[in-house]
Amino acid sequence: MSKLLRKLFISILLLASVGYAEAAETKPLKIKAETNVANMDMVIKDNFIKAKYASAENRFAQSNVKASYDDFNDLVQRTSHDDYVFLVYAMKMAEYGFFDLSDALIKKLDNNDFTKYYISDIKKFYYPSAMVNSKDLIYLADAYSNIVYNNMAIETTSELLNSPKAAESDYKNYLIALGYYKSNNLNQALKYINNAMVENDSNINYLILKAKILADSNKSSQALKTLEKIKKTSFMTADFQNKVRAAEEYVLYKTTKPEALKDYHLAYYYHLQGKSLLATKVLQSAVLHAKQYSPEIFSLLGKIYYENDEPLKAQEFAERAYREDSGNYLAAITLADLSFDNRKYESALKYYKKAKSLTKDAAPSVGLAKTYLALEKDKKSKKLYEKLLKKHGNDEELLVDSLKVFPQKSDYYLPKVASIDISNNDIWLGLANLAIRDNNFTMATTYLNNSYYIDANNFKYYYYLSLVLRAKGDFELADQSLIRCSRLNSDYAADVNPGHSIYEE
């Protein structure tokens, strides 16, 4: 299912499960001006936090690291308890090497099913074997900033080598390796990443750098062996699974021999990093020079266009790939999803079954289950979903799709999806909807705050906010929020015009 249609499905499902969207007689609203924003206190707070966070990031990139650290530290101290924001910041602090701030945020988190996966993944991916004092930590973070953002790898590596600061830190050895890698001194890079791994051989960030060094050094078999070790490490959350997948595609790009396949993996790497336009340019160039690999290239183009909600282009390229190679998994699963989206369910079954024969992944089986449901083969669908949930209970797509069959379990499945993908905005909105159903407006507000932080212009956010405000007796602000919803998406509230509301209890 494409991203656009998935969001629409979740929205419709969640509205139906609570039943707040029933229309009633329209009534005129009396408002002063649209600038009288609903939930202003929360908007001011979140906008302040976002602005301060952006400033801290800019300072870090400009190597004003001490000021960046102070800004981030101020945010850590100021930010009111919110597990979502704490986790987002904890990941970024760990990436920058501000491990003490990351740890401080983690210690503030509630110890529950929602947070435990992210806590585990952050530590497995980034954390050194031992913390250094704050002065040395800032020194090392400054080195990271200069290497990664300021094209000063040679100078910074020399400084690290000649400084006694943080001498026993495996993270310092990692940074020296990173500096050598960025300056293309691969032999020394390999030496120092191995030094880092003597102290901490389970750090996945270190392993990924080692795999890249080996791949760039034309030591393909060693690079692939390191990659296999990385892939054996279990990550539960979408953010870190994506980092591992991107590393895999980079190593395959460097170790694959045919130029067209190298371009295929490079394009996949770009796509996983959110650079889909660059990925399509690489693929379109590649297919001109190596037609024997056109099924692989066409299938990836189809997948990229599909995931970017361009179904016509997705259909064109997936069909071309499948015509040339019916054993191509990406082509089969893309055609299956397109058929399902277009309600061509018999065709969808055909392609899902074909895709299932080509992979051990859960996606084709999830597709079969939802297609049986669409064909009103409820018993067959339910049985398949139950089987899949036992085997792939942490698969995000499976959990979301199973809400159609087990809506009564939304109280369990929605938090579980949030625990593996905190950036899934529709899930936060769904959790808010459940809290509204239960008259728990405090939790509903917390979930809505998370949604606003992800996307301040999400029309569904303003709809749910209007429900919370109305329940609290803030009728004028509730009406204004509803108007904002209709102006952001007229199809969602087609009969809501400025000054009028059809959503009345």
Image (cartoon, rainbow, N blue to C red):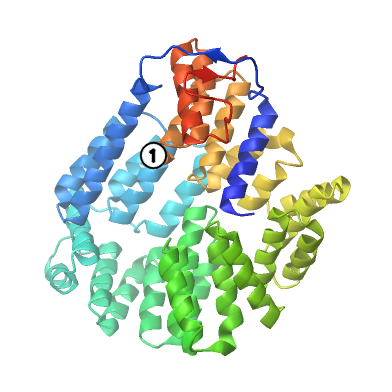
Q: Name the secondary structure under disc 1.
A: helix
Q: Residue at x 47, y 37 (%)?
A: 458
Nearer to us in this view, 45 or 415:
45
Where does the image place residue 62, in percent across and percent down from the top left? 17, 55
Is residue 444 depicted above or below 320 in this figure?
above
Q: Residue at x 79, y 48 (%)?
A: 374
456 to the left or right of 11: left
Q: Amino acid at mark 1?
A: Phe
Nearer to us in this view, 412 or 455:
455
Where does the image place residue 477, in percent across and percent down from the top left? 44, 17
Is residue 390 depicted above or below 168 in this figure?
above
Which image quarter holds the N terminus? bottom right
Q: Residue at x 35, y 22 (%)?
A: 40
Where does the image place residue 260, in percent across and percent down from the top left? 49, 85
174 to the left or right of 85: left
Is residue 353 depicted above or below 40 in this figure?
below
Which image quarter holds the C terminus? top right
Res 404 → quadrant: top right
Count neighbours of disc 1 (C-alpha within 10 A) and say few if under 14, some if 14 to 19, many if 20 or more. many
Q: Residue at x 56, y 12 (%)?
A: 27
Residue on which disc 1 sits = 86
Number of marks drawn:
1
Nearer to us in this view, 33 or 294:
33
232 to the left or right of 368: left
Res 296 → quadrant: bottom right
Q: Is residue 110 visible?
A: no
Nearer to us in this view, 55 or 337:
337
Where does the image place residue 34, in percent across and percent down from the top left? 37, 23
Q: Is residue 465 visible?
A: yes
